[in-house]
Image (cartoon, coloured by chain):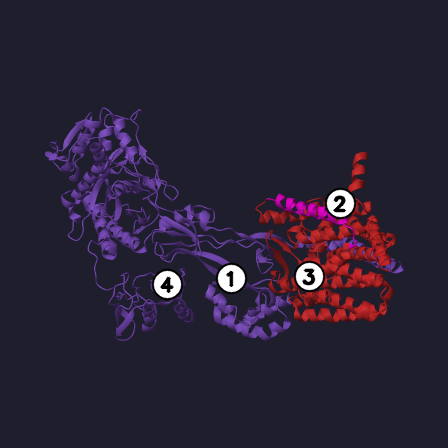
Amino acid sequence: MLRVRLSFLVVSLIAVAIFYRIGTIQLVEGEKWRQMSEDINLQYRPVKATRGNIYSANGSLLATSLPFYRVAMDPSVGKASVLKSGVDSLATRLAGFYRDRSAAAYKRMIMDARNQGKKYLILNRKQIGYQEKLEMMTWPVFREGRMGGGVIFEKIDKRYRPFKNLAGRTVGFLNEDQYGVGLEYSFNEYLEGRNGEALFQKIAGGSWKPLHDAEDIKPTDGYDIVTTLDVNIQDVAESALLRQLMNKDAAYGSVIVMEVSTGHIKAIANLQKNKNGYGYGEYYNYAVGEQGLTEPGSTFKLLSMLALLEEGKINLRDSIDTGNGSYKFYDRFMRDAKNGGYGKISVREVFEKSSNVGVSKMVHEHFGHQPHRFIEYISQVKLDQPLGFQLQGEGMPYFKDPKNKDWYGTTLPWMSIGYELKVTPLQTLAFYNAIANDGKMVKPLIVREISRGNSVEKKYQTETISKRIASEKTVKQLQSLLKGVVESGTARNIKNETYSIAGKTGTAQKLENGRYTQKYFTSFAGYFPADRPKYSAIIVIDSPKGFNAYGGDISAPVFREIADKIYAQDMEVQDKPTLEARHPASDPEAFPYIRAGNVEELRMICNSMGISNHYTGNETWVRSTISNKAIHWVSNAVEAPTVPDVSGMTLKDAIYILENKGLRVQFSGKGRVTGQSLPKGSSYRKDQVIKLTLS
Amino acid sequence: MVRVKVWLEENLKGDPIIWAIVLLLSLISVLAVYSATGSLAYRKMGGNTEIYLFKHSALIISSLVVMWAVHNIPYKYFSKLSLFALWVSVPLLLFTYLFGSKINEASRWITIPIIDQAFQPSDLAKLALIAAVAGMLAKRQRQITDIRITFIPLLIWIGTICLLIAIANMSTAVMLLSTCLLLMFIGRVPVKYLMVVCMVGAIVLSTAIFMGQRGGVFFSRIEKFIDEDPNEIPFQAKHSYIAIATGGITGKGPGKSEQRNILPHPYSDFIYAIIIEEYGMVGGGVVLFLYLALLYRGMRVVAISTRPFGGLLSAGLSFSLVIQAMINMGVAVGLVPITGLPLPMVSMGGTSLIFTGISLGIILSISRGDHEDAFLSEEKAMGNMVKKVA
């Protein structure tokens, strides 16, 4: 028991020592520690999560966050030996890098700060990029890291748009007060990620120094969003719109291009005259937003025709007397654009020539005693409801109610030609798109997917708003009417031989301070090719100047220009698929040597040469595309049970892939593959011969 | 009241003072951990501080249940069980070292499949080694000075287990080695042999330092502790002192700690600093006293127990618990270099709380006294058999 007691005594002594230390810390050293607690200013501060990227439909970056770094140093951290041997060379590198002061000055700055016991020294306020940071991390002293050499890289994320202002208002922005527009704002919840937290110490000069190397709570980076926007179409739309706006010195204009069957928005352009009166820029999304609500004018006549046809009251061959181009409803004159009027014409001609008198007379005759029926047709095609579009701030359509006091006898006739009501261009387009889509109305879609890395978080499928907005017969008749407008009506000027367009012009007099002015709001809504619609689009141009201020003259040509370019570019739209073997286009911008191959090899080459390149897929074989001076690898589906596309590959790679698929390869020439005898995507037999041409 | 008392006497056997101490410490633990996780919970769980309160309370209660269950087991079984557990812990420790999950670059944890609970095999090894050493010492009391029979097997086991623990967790190994030394000292092993153990231990531990994962950390901490430059006090120590100094005599009050936001692991390694910050020198003194009292009661069991195994086991386990507590508190006040040992029964922590519960259960089982009879009956039976054979 003696030994037990002895042991207990020892532990008791330790306990006494602990208690004694508490006493010492509290009473003897107390003042010092309490003072220190006042001095040390520590705080948990957020560590920003990296914001997600916004991609176009084909994977081009529309907006991304690039990391930049500010280089600082805790000069007290490094061991004397590390600093002694490395500081000269480090100072030389710093001087060579920043070129703002001499090596001696950098050395003096670091050593002085160390001798003064400083814990934080900003080496230079200039922000450096990631590649530069990687390089700096190999420099003497710096290579010892945060804890060994004391280097601090403070990350600052900057939002960067590779395509500058392309689709600027649609991509949008978000400022620090959480005010923003467009996708950046509407999808902020996904893009922003979750900030982490780390312990920071306040240092002289009001800045904060991270205390540990890693964050205490890691930030979760934001999701990427993949839009349906097509960079090429967007570019075409913007430049075509801009040219016309400048020609006509118009106030603003908008273009929306949409894929008929899916509702995918391929382009949204909004251009508005700059405040100083010169040039145009994107300041508001008139295509979608509240300020884009306008009296649409004649494009709305499509709805009037739909109501009349559905009601079964008219036949396209009926004739209507539009008289001398002027007709009095109660106290107001309805006038046609043509002086002297169109006289007696058919219903079809009423629409094709866009006769206000004709349409309003028919609507007044058939719906005048029951205006609510007309309103019901508006509801039937869902024009009275916002579309629930993915961008925030969609304009709310405005229609008068027959039961209200502001419903006059003249309301219905004027409504039938697109006045006394307000809709956005996007809502009008959704209606036209439904006609193009054989009556099926789909919801316009601009964000297709939300993902992080290779995993998809959320997919947005095309939603059907209405399976059928009108009977099949009516839809067919409306389609033929729209085709007629271009064939022989107000948009004759955009008719062409290669492919057919269907659509409707619109010219609305602008209402300012309660009076209709001599300013016009011109529009063209339609789709192409007319018999197998692939894309629909609407063009609106506000207050063009000059003699011909009609939709047919102002907006329709823009539609034509955009349609021409898309048609030339997009093979699928073309009626006759070309059977030629595909040759890689000799695009002067294309990367000259690497066109296709094994992704790992290609990336290695590019990385070692310092060529910026991106790849997000997981296929082994890729081909290159150029986006923003960087190479973007797209997967080259060689796994499919059809003949793969080997153009642009080296012979070695092409043989490897083709022989593995059981094909026999014959080739001529040298260099890279420029042609293959079996077209890509076609089926083949085992041991079939494929001839490759190389050059 | 009477019924409660009767129920308590029937169900909570063994030393009532140990029961009281454990319950008191558990209560302090819930309060202190709840406060210390305040900021942590706020940050990790998006403000739901109750999650940690429930989690920790559930663990405390389970460890009490385990303790109650163990105290009903006659302690003689632990002798054999401990040897079995020792054999199990060797591969477990190896496995953990090679494949375990790394927290702060030391692999000390493995995750038990199915229940998905992180588990530190060194907890099991520690308990098993102490029980085994107590068992071996008790069995060989008569040949205690015999090097070959008594000393060598002891040395081999202690050396192996300490080495395996040391490669990943130096402080636990040092603490376990000193507990074993103390146990051998109490078990009447001659002091000159203990010197040998010290030597071997030093060699083993220094080997582990060079082989192990955390050698660098170990040296830098010792180095920093020894040449203490007043301006170079480690970050944790500085804030621990600030917590203690600003706590004053009576403390800032429950839940008012400020250093919990800054000290790393305020709910485990530095919980003593948080206790002093919130409950002052008085609170710190009470906790210190409770551990001493626990040790004292554990020692009394040694005096009561007629069996050398019971006495040695109780002494070993009480010392192990209390030494760990002293080290933890010593770190907080700067007597000991910074290590990551939790404060037994008080710190938040999964399986280590359960193992503490087992240790306390064993001590209680020994303190009951009635389990001694189990030995007697067994011996009688053995005696009878011997007679029959004869």
Callout 4: chain:
A
Which residues fall within the magenta stretch?
B48-76
Total numbered badges shown on the rendered structure: 4
Give the distance between the C-alpha atoms of the residues marked 4 and 2, in whole angstroms.
Answer: 65 Å
Give the distance between the C-alpha atoms of the residues marked 2 and 3, in whole angstroms.
Answer: 30 Å
Q: Which of the two residues, B47 or B118, is positioned nearer the viewer here?
A: B118
Give the distance between the C-alpha atoms of the residues marked 1 and 4, in whole angstroms.
Answer: 31 Å
> Which amino acid lies under the numbered mark 4 shown in the image of this protein?
Trp
Q: Which mark is residue A70?
A: 1
Q: What chain is the red one? A: B
Look at mark 3 in the image and give the residue it sits on. Answer: B89
Q: What chain is the purple one? A: A
Give the percent coordinates (x, y) of residue B304.
Answer: 87, 52
Look at mark 4 in the image and give the residue it sits on. Answer: A633
Find residue A88 and report its image quarter.
Answer: bottom right
Callout 1: chain:
A
Say whether marks 4 and 3 touch (CB < 8 Å).
Answer: no
- Left or right, B265 with respect to B143, comes to left
